Image (tube, rainbow, N blue to C red):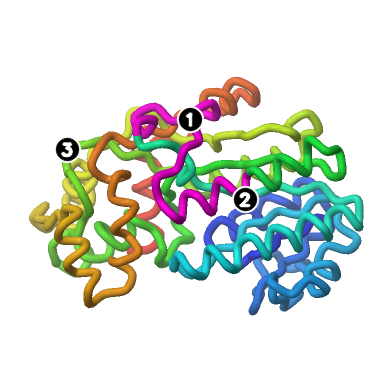
Amino acid sequence: MQTILGSGGAIGTELARALPAYTDTVRLVSRSPSRVNPGDVLMATDLTNKEAVNQAVAGSEVAYLTVGLTYDTKVWETSWPLIVDNVIEACKAHGCKLVFFDNVYMYHPDTMGNMTEGSLVDPVSRKGRVRARLADKIQAASKEGSIRTLIARSADFYGPSIKDVSLLTESVLKPLSQGKKAQCLGRMDVEHSFTYTPDAGKATALLGNTDDAYGEVWHLPTASDPYTMKQWVEIVAGYFGVPPKYLAANKFIVRLIGLFVPIMKEMSEMMYQYDRDYIFVSDKFQKRFNWTPTSYQEGIEEVLSTNY
């Protein structure tokens, strides 16, 4: 059996679809889990509860931590360390391997234009410092030899199973589909990588079932030569047959809006990711597994035809 902790989001969904190729039983764990495959085992669990996590991991060969918390710095600072500690302890108790689905918040802003597994870890945001501490905990457990762990790291992502919580969906796809202007952050002339969620799910499952992948950080397969945000707007607008109009908010505007809109207040410290090229490099994974990521053209066509 293999278990997904935090199975309700887009990544958990795509991972669940991929895992039956490797295991007879997939256990989906979240506050309100729903089946993805007919034979999935469901377990409603609060991952901040140590005993509940212990029960959720019991009997598992591999546990995948893909939970997404509310985009709130205080929640991240209090809940994330607790969840990761609970999962590490449960994996130790049951001899279970751990795969942690991660983002790029811990990288220094100067690395944004060429992010690799070796990029400088020196976060400038509170959320980034949380992510760096989590990665340290997981890698320390691996180095101690108490459990086997790996980190699967993704860029911002997009895909057909995403209904919200995606930069591309919320800022470009939804407004343009309604004939409104795209609502973007930062500069429109900079390139921005996006990981395609079906690729992320399949690749995470592959890593979790590859013995020599453990003990390392892996960038999940992501297409090279990303579009600028202006190009994303033009492509999507062309699909809907609407003018490629947009509004782009700089850091000052985001801070101003944040006085009234909590989520924008949370975005203020992350604006360095949208005022420069954001290029995510997955050469290590692609070479190791002979994998070609889904192209942006193919990916966006699938998203638009599926959801719009």
Which callout, 2 or 3, points at the residue further toward the start of the chain?
Answer: 2
Count of residue discs: 3
Q: Quadrant of residue 259?
A: bottom left
Q: Nearer the viewer, residue 7 or 186?
A: 186
Q: Position of residue 118 (x, y in %)?
A: 53, 26
Q: CA distance from mark 3 to mark 1?
A: 25 Å
Task: Give residue 134's mark.
Answer: 2
Q: Residue 284: name its quadrant.
A: top right
| 186 to the left or right of 49 | left
Where disc 2 sits, the SS reads helix
Do callouts 2 and 3 mark residues in contact (Cβ within 8 Å)?
no
The magenta stretch is: 110-135
Q: Position of residue 239 (x, y in %)?
A: 22, 52
Q: Residue 189: which numbered mark, if any?
A: 3
205 within the magenta span: no
Q: Residue at x 25, y 57 (%)?
A: 172
Name the residue rendered at 76%, 59% in the picture.
87
Q: Residues within 10 Å of mark 1 (few under 14, many from 20)?
A: some
Sequence-wise, the earlier of marks 1 and 2 is: 1
Q: CA distance from mark 1 to mark 2?
A: 16 Å
- Tell me the tag on residue 120: 1
Q: Nearer the viewer, mark 2 or mark 3?
A: 2
Nearer to us of marks 3 and 1 is 1
Q: Residue at x 87, y 44 (%)?
A: 146
Residue type at mark 3 is Asp
Tag 2: amino acid: Leu
Q: Residues within 10 Å of mark 2 (few under 14, many from 20)?
A: many
At mark 1, the secondary structure is loop
In this rendered view, identify the residue nearer to me: 236 or 246: 246
Q: Amino acid at mark 1?
A: Leu
Residue 125, magenta (yes or no)? yes
Q: Outermost residue, top direction?
A: 287
